[in-house]
Image: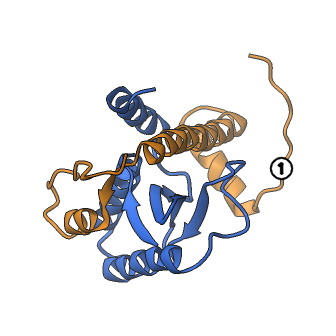
Chain colours: A orange, B blue
C-alpha cells in the first residue's frame, strides 16, 4: 500500500513512552503510531456503520423501552440484553 | 419527548457497563446519575445545533464526567438512542462490525 508522510507534534513524554513500547516489540515508533491511528479510524468507521443501521431501525420503529434498559442496567451481570418491545409501525 | 433505545445501542451499553464493572475504583453510581441526567437533557432540550459527523439527523450528547456520549436521532415525539459511544475510541472495530452485520441480518438491509 502506498504511504505518505504525516508530521505531528507530540508531548515529549508520550513520544518516549511510544518509543519504549516500539522497542519492546522490535518495531519502529512510526509503525506503532500507525497501528494506534488505524485502530481509532476503524473504530470511528465501525461506529458510523452502526449509526446507519440505527437510523434504519428508527425508521422501522423497532426499539426497546427506557424501562427495560433501566432494569437490565440494574440487574445481574449475566442478564440477557432486552429484546425490542416497541413496534411503532 | 420520550426516550427509546435502538438495538444498535447494545454494544455501547454493554461496553460501558463492562468498563464500570472492570474499574470498581470509578464512581459507578455517579456515572449512572450522569447517564440519567443526559437522557433528561435529550428529552427536555432541543437538539444541539451541530450534528454528529455529517449526519443530518444524528446528535451527540456527552454523559458528563464520563468518557461516554449518547448518539441519538428523533422521529416524531421520540428520541431514539442509537449508540452509547466511548469518545476515546477504545471499542473494538471488529466487534462493532460483527454486531452490526448480525443486526442487519435480523432487521433487513
**The N terminus of chain A sits in image quarter:** top right
| Image x and y of residue A9, in percent | 83, 55
Relative vertical location of residue B79 with respect to residue B82 in this rendering, above or below:
below
Relative vertical location of residue B38 with respect to residue A17 in this rendering, above or below:
below
Q: Report the side of B55 relative to B64 (left or right).
A: right
In terms of depth relative to the viewer, which is nearer, A19 or B92? B92
| Image x and y of residue B12, in percent | 41, 53
Q: Residue at x 22, y 51 (%)?
A: A81
Q: Residue at x 59, y 63 (%)?
A: B60
Residue farthest top in this picture: A1
Residue B68 makes an appearance in the image: yes
Q: Residue at x 35, y 77 (%)?
A: B32
User: Which residue is denoted by mark 1 in the rendering?
Assistant: A8
SS assignment at label 1: loop
Q: How many marks?
A: 1
State which chain disc 1 sits on: A
**Rendered image quadrant of residue A73:** bottom left
| Image x and y of residue A71, in percent | 20, 67
Amino acid at each position: 500500500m502506498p504511504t505518505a508522510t504525516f508530521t505531528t507534534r507530540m508531548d515529549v513524554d508520550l513520544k518516549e513512552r511510544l518509543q519504549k513500547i516500539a522497542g519492546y516489540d522490535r518495531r519502529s515508533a512510526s509503525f506503532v503510531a500507525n497501528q494506534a491511528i488505524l485502530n481509532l479510524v476503524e473504530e470511528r468507521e465501525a461506529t458510523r456503520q452502526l449509526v446507519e443501521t440505527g437510523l434504519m431501525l428508527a425508521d422501522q420503529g423497532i426499539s426497546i423501552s427506557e424501562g427495560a434498559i433501566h432494569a437490565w442496567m440494574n440487574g445481574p451481570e449475566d442478564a440477557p440484553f432486552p429484546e425490542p418491545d416497541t413496534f411503532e409501525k | 419527548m420520550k426516550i427509546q433505545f435502538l438495538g444498535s445501542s447494545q454494544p455501547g451499553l454493554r461496553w460501558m457497563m463492562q468498563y464500570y464493572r472492570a474499574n470498581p475504583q470509578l464512581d459507578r453510581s455517579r456515572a449512572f446519575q450522569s447517564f440519567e441526567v443526559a437522557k433528561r437533557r435529550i428529552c427536555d432540550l432541543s437538539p444541539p445545533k451541530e450534528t454528529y459527523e455529517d449526519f443530518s439527523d444524528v446528535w451527540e450528547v456527552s454523559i458528563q464526567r464520563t468518557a461516554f456520549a449518547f448518539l441519538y436521532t428523533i422521529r416524531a415525539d421520540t428520541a431514539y438512542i442509537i449508540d452509547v459511544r466511548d469518545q476515546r475510541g477504545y471499542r473494538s472495530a471488529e466487534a462493532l462490525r460483527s454486531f452490526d452485520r448480525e443486526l442487519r441480518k435480523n432487521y433487513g438491509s
